[in-house]
């Protein structure tokens, strides 16, 4: 089942072309809630094989709110784009989309191991995937790409805005008490408040959401 409406996607081979695509597509990102009942959530992650020549993408579908795994898929694709910070979606998404296509049904919500709006051009991997599939997406990154923030209280569930100038581009969220935070941002069809809520509801005993943890294990060569 094609998640991109059957459209053929032309993937760029150079940074200039990739930047032009980001500049064009970022206006399609929906920053407000437009998601129905959430009964499944998905995590995606990517690894590389054959000295980086092959991209291995994994998607794991979990029941929500119980977070029990119900389906999974792996796809391998030739690596088409170099590693360039700020342009990782062009390196990873061809394989991710192929893995999503192998699920019997699309997820209601995807938590991406990467950035959404918290990106120099407001079009990180979670935004790119959301726009291409029209599935609600959230970016939950392990590290900060851009932005500044105030000190974060140590307790689980506390968060502070991540800002770039006067614009709030995400949230720095504590998912475990006195453990390093994660960086949450809008991907597509989800508000920041809702993105924070679902990130916490998908996180149990560990720093990272269960979606990310399951997908990472499957994606690792």
Image (cartoon, grey):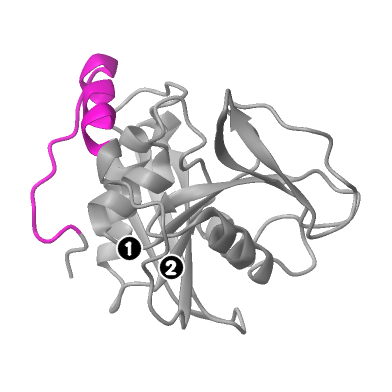
Q: Is residue 140 magenta?
A: no
Q: Tell me if residue 181 comes above or below residue 194 in the rendering.
A: above
Residue occupying the far top of the picture? 16
Tell me which corner region of the image, top left, top right, bottom left or bottom right, holds residue 68.
bottom right
Return the x and y of residue 73 as percentages of the image width and height: 38, 66
Return the x and y of residue 57 as percentages of the image width and height: 40, 51
Q: Tell me if residue 153 comes above or below residue 168 in the rendering.
A: below
Q: For residue 22, say whether it is visible.
A: yes
Quarter in which the N terminus is drawn: bottom left
Q: Left of 154 or right of it: where is 160?
A: left
Between 69 and 54, the one lying in front of the other is 69
Contact flag, marks 1 and 2 (Cβ < 8 Å): yes
Return the x and y of residue 58 as percentages of the image width and height: 43, 57
CA–CA distance in space, label 1 to label 2: 6 Å
Q: Left of 169 or right of it: where is 123?
A: left
Q: Residue at x 27, y 60 (%)?
A: 134
Tell me which corner region of the image, top left, top right, bottom left or bottom right, holds residue 100.
bottom left
Residue hosting label 2: 109
Residue hosting label 1: 135
Q: Left of 202 or right of it: where is 80?
A: left
């Amino acid at each position: 089942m094609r998640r991109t409406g059957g459209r053929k996607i032309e993937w760029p081979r150079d940074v200039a072309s990739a930047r032009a695509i980001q500049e064009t597509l970022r206006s399609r990102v929906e920053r407000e809630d437009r998601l129905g009942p959430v009964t499944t959530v998905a995590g995606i992650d990517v690894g590389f094989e054959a000295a980086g020549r092959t991209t291995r993408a994994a998607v794991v579908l979990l029941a929500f709110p119980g977070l029990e795994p119900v389906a999974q898929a792996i796809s391998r694709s030739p690596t088409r784009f170099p590693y360039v910070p700020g342009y990782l979606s062009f390196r990873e998404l061809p394989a991710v989309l192929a893995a999503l296509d192998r699920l019997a049904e699309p997820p209601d919500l995807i938590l991406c191991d990467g950035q959404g709006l918290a990106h120099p051009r407001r079009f990180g991997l979670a935004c790119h995937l959301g726009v291409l599939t029209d599935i609600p997406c959230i970016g939950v990154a392990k590290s900060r790409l851009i932005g500044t923030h105030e000190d974060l209280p140590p307790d689980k569930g506390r968060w502070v805005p991540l800002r770039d100038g006067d614009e709030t581009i995400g949230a720095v969220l504590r998912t475990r008490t006195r453990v390093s935070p994660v960086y949450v941002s809008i991907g597509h069809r989800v508000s920041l408040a809702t993105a924070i809520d679902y990130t916490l509801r998908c996180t149990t005993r560990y720093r990272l959401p269960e979606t990310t943890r399951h997908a990472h294990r499957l994606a690792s060569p």
